[in-house]
Image (cartoon, rainbow, N blue to C red):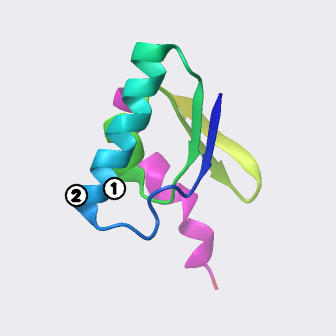
Amino acid sequence: MILADEPVSALDPRAAEEVLALLADLAHNDGLAVLAVLHQPDLALGHADRVVGMRLSEVAFDRVPGEVSGEQLGNLYAHLHEA
């Protein structure tokens, strides 16, 4: 199992894509479980087999990437804009 907390937060977009592709290859080709915490939904949707959205320490959704809506993603950060 690989646990990766913000593995691409300080990387440029190209390097971030390469790192996430490597993690996905390890998961699919070597049978490793990979859990990565990301704050870039587009990267999660592009590389994950499953996406779990967390909002205020609770699970907001748990879906395959194709089932995650823009509204669900927007709701993850809505509390930051509330007065």
Asked if disc 1 and disc 2 are in contact, CB closer than 8 Å, the reply is: yes
The residue shown at (55%, 58%) is: 6
In the rendered image, the quadrant that contains the N terminus is top right
Which amino acid lies under the numbered mark 2 shown in the image of this protein?
Answer: Arg
In the rendered image, the quadrant that contains the C terminus is bottom right
Residue 13 placement (x, y as % from top left): 26, 62
For residue 68: magenta?
Answer: yes
Count the marks.
2
Q: Is residue 46 visible?
A: yes
Residue at the disc numbered 1: 16
Residue 36 placement (x, y as % from top left): 56, 43
Q: Is residue 46 left or right of residue 41?
A: left
Q: Quadrant of residue 61?
A: top right
Q: Quadrant of residue 48?
A: top left
Residue at the disc numbered 2: 14
Where 43 falls versus 50 (above or below)? Answer: below
As helix, strand or loop, the secondary structure at mark 1 comes to helix
Residue 32's disc is none
